[in-house]
Image (cartoon, rainbow, N blue to C red):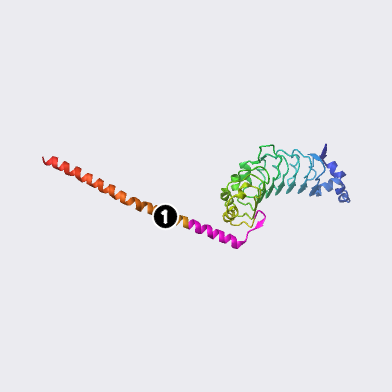
């Protein structure tokens, strides 16, 4: 089993020249970037001597568990895509983490991110899920990321509902291509993201819906790119004006229908009122006659 340790760093040719002029322990204290991708690494050992580590590249390995990173309080970028990770664990001390890459793993439930209040990018695409599974995101984790997350990639994860994501009000780039989204009620979700600039939903059933593109453009006013195609500002304004005009006509027609309904019922109501008065008059007259006798 290949394990990432201080000894493995010492043996790495990438770090050999950098060590000259410094003792190895001193060098480890200056280390900010660590490149160990595509090394068949299965486990992370004790790296606590690398206290100033800010960027860690561990993608394309065989890692099954996130561990032994509690020392890395200065870490801002963590690249662990294309491993065999099943759970997101042991990240609570990485409070400066701003970019987290976990695509291509085996994660079914996204959790363990509650303390990452500075996380700006979260990449979770292409999880290798069991048949019938879909990627789920813990709502409490979403609340924790509501004020920071700007980029979210959840491509190809069998997702059929994204309503819980409405809390991510800082979102600017959203990618959910090749999922199972089919309902145009998504418009309401996107209206909660006032800073959204780019969105990709290619490969979802919803893309086949009538006027799909037009409706999303009018729902997300700040959107600049949808499904890889730019949005012309004149087109956007035309669609917004068209939607407003359509809603105004609908409101006017509803008002006319209500007025017409009231008028059509008026003769019937008047007739019933006349019958009521006539009956009342007869009753009163009959009572008056009986009293006079």
Q: Nearer the viewer, residue 198 or 228?
A: 228
Q: Which residue is at a point 59% across and 45% down the rendered structure image?
A: 163
| Membership of 239 in magenta stretch | yes
| 15 with respect to 152 (left or right) | right
Badge count: 1
- Specify the farthest residue to the bottom: 234
Question: Closest to the observer: 220 or 31?
Answer: 220
Q: Is residue 127 left or right of residue 206?
A: right
Report x, y in % for residue 17.
88, 51
Quadrant containing the C terminus is top left
Residue at horizontal 61 percent and vertical 62 percent from the top: 233
- The secondary structure type at the circle numbered 1 is helix
Tell me if residue 264 can be seen.
Answer: yes
Q: Give the residues in magenta.
A: 226-248
Quadrant in the picture for the N terminus: top right
Residue 44 seen in this snapshot? no
Question: Is 129 situated above or below 20?
Answer: above
Does residue 24 appear to the left or right of 129 in the view shown? right
Give the residue at mark 1. Answer: 255
Occupied quadrant, residue 239:
bottom right
In this rendering, the answer to whether 129 lies above or below 201 is: above
Residue 247: where, in percent of width, then height? 49, 56
Residue 260, position in %: x, y? 38, 54
Give me the residue at 77% from left, 47% from top. Answer: 56
Q: Is residue 156 magenta?
A: no
**Residue visible at 51% across and 58% down?**
244
Is 254 positioned to the left or the right of 267 in the image?
right
Q: Position of residue 28 (x, y in %)?
A: 82, 46
Check disc 1: other Cα within 10 Å, few if <14, some if 14-19, many if 20+. Answer: few
Q: Nearer the viewer, residue 108 or 146?
A: 108
Which SS type dominates the magenta stretch? helix
């Amino acid at each position: 089993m290949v394990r990432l340790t201080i000894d493995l760093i010492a043996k790495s040719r990438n770090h050999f020249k950098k060590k000259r002029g410094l003792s190895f322990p001193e060098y480890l204290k200056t280390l900010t970037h660590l490149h160990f991708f595509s090394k068949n690494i299965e486990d992370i050992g004790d790296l606590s001597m690398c206290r100033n580590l800010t960027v860690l590249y561990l993608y394309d390995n065989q890692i099954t568990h996130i561990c032994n990173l509690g020392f890395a309080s200065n870490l801002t970028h963590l690249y662990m895509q294309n491993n065999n990770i099943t759970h997101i664990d042991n990240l609570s001390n990485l409070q400066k983490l701003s970019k987290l890459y976990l695509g291509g793993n085996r994660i079914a439930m996204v959790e363990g991110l509650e303390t990452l209040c500075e996380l700006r990018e979260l990449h979770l695409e292409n999880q290798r899920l069991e048949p019938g599974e879909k990627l789920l995101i813990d709502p409490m984790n979403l609340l924790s990321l509501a004020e920071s997350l700007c980029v979210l990639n959840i491509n190809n994860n069998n997702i059929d509902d994204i309503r819980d994501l409405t809390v991510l009000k800082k979102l600017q780039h959203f990618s959910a291509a090749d999922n199972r989204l089919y309902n145009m009620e998504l418009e309401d979700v996107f209206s909660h993201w006032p800073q959204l600039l780019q969105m990709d939903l290619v490969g979802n059933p919803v893309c086949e819906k009538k006027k799909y593109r037009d409706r999303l453009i009018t729902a997300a006013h700040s959107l600049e790119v949808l499904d890889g195609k730019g949005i012309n500002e004149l087109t956007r304004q035309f669609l917004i004006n068209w939607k407003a005009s359509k809603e105004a006509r609908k409101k006017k027609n509803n008002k006319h229908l209500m007025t017409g309904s009231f008028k059509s019922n008026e003769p019937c109501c008047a007739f019933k009122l006349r019958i009521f008065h006539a009956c009342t008059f007869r009753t009163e007259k009959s009572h008056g006659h009986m009293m006079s006798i």
